[in-house]
Image: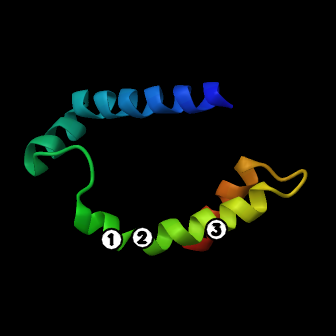
Amino acid sequence: QFIVVVIGLFSVSEILLMLEHTSSGGKLVRTTGRMLFNFKELVYCTGTMLRSSTIGFFVGILPGAGATIASAITYMSEK
């Protein structure tokens, strides 16, 4: 599973670079002066991250249910 983690890390940086080069993304970066979230946004989303992580973990360990089903369930619960 190490390969999946490495690919994921490279994809996050590539997504941020692509966002910076789009017209709306570049405008957003110039307006806020940053590309990542700040501490206030992290605190605001902590409850959502904990709930989603817990649900995703328990659904993900079920036989036959993988990451796709777990992410769909957590998305629907937070939506």
Asked if 13 appears above or below 49 in the picture, the reply is above
Residue 57 spot, x, y in % from top left:
70, 60
Identify residue type, mark 2: Thr
Q: Amino acid at mark 3?
A: Thr
What's the residue at 22%, 40% (across, down)?
24
Dot 1 surroundings within 10 Å: few (below 14), some, or many (20 or more)? few
How many residues crowd around disc 3 within 10 Å: few (fewer than 14), some, or many (20 or more)?
Answer: few
Q: Are marks 2 and 1 in contact (CB under 8 Å)?
A: yes
Looking at the rendered structure, which numbered label has been put on residue 34?
Answer: none
In the rendered view, would you say 35 is above or below 39? above
Mark drawn on residue 46? 2
Mark 1 secondary-structure assignment = helix
Q: Dividing the picture into quarters, in which one does residue 28 lie?
A: top left
Q: Amino acid at mark 1?
A: Val
Relative depth, front residue between 24 and 73: 73
Cα–Cα span, label 3 and label 2: 12 Å
Q: Which mark is residue 43?
A: 1
- Side of 34 relative to 48 (left or right): left
- What separation in Å lies between label 3 and label 1 (alpha carbons)? 17 Å
The picture quadrant where one finds residue 76 is bottom right
Q: Could you tell me how far apart the alpha carbons at marks 2 and 1 are, in whole angstroms?
A: 5 Å
For label 3, the residue is 54
SS class, disc 3: helix
Give the mark nearer the N terminus: 3 vs 1: 1
Q: Position of residue 48 (x, y in %)?
A: 49, 70
Q: Residue at x 9, y 48 (%)?
A: 31
Residue 35 appears in which quarter of the rendering?
top left
